[in-house]
Image (tube, rainbow, N blue to C red):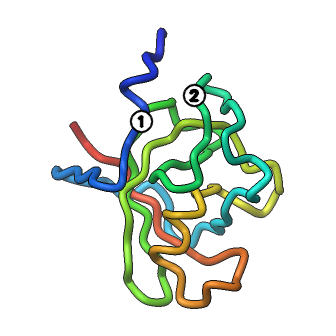
Amino acid sequence: MLVLQQELTPDSLFIQTGNFKLYKKTAHASYYADKFHNKRTASGIKYDRNKFTAAHKKLPFGTTLKITNEANGKSVIVIVTDRGPFVRSREIDLSKRAFMDIANNKSAGAMMVTIEILQK
């Protein structure tokens, strides 16, 4: 499958509507370290900490996800653009922007989330 870069560049105005299907509840999420900003992802595009993107071990690039913080109910929509995380207990890495938008504690490095997949 060929992944086109323009398909994987959500911006801060990215809004997706549709039906979401539960993928995983009580998943451990973290966010990318700043050192990865502007580095190439596994999909070939550059990671931008200010975009709404995520890394997942198995979900296809371009998959649209709704990530909900289980502690406060806040959610964001992200697109899978990379592989990871590579820490055994973690299910998903979010861009810094996506993580901070739903975090209770901005200094925390991880949170429990629910992951839903957009059904097209």
Q: Quadrant of residue 55?
A: top right
Between 72 and 100, which is closer to the camera in this rendering?
A: 100
The residue lying at 35 percent from left, 55 percent from top is 12
Q: Earlier in the sequence, mark 2 or mark 1?
A: 1
The residue lying at 45 percent from left, 53 percent from top is 52
Position of 19 relative to 71 (above/below) = above
Circle 1 packing at 10 Å, graded few (<14), some (14-19), many (20+), is some
Residue 70 falls left or right of residue 45: left
The residue lying at 43 percent from left, 16 percent from top is 4
- SS at mark 1 in the image: loop
Q: Position of residue 60 (x, y in %)?
A: 50, 30
Q: Position of residue 85 (x, y in %)?
A: 73, 50
Q: Position of residue 74 (x, y in %)?
A: 38, 79
Residue at far front of view: 38
How many numbered circles does the render carry?
2
Between 117 and 96, which is closer to the camera in this rendering?
A: 96
Image quadrant containing the C terminus: top left
Between 15 and 113, which is closer to the camera in this rendering?
A: 15
Q: Quadrant of residue 72?
A: bottom left
Identify residue for label 2. 45
- SS at mark 2 in the image: loop
Label 2 close to label 1 by CB (< 8 Å) = yes
Amino acid type, label 1? Thr
Residue 60 falls left or right of residue 107: left
Amino acid type, label 2? Ile
Residue 48 tag number: none
Position of 105 relative to 30 (above/below) = below
Residue at far left of view: 18
Residue 44 falls left or right of residue 7: right
Position of 114 relative to 106 (above/below) = above
Q: Position of residue 92 (x, y in %)?
A: 62, 55
Identify residue for label 1. 9
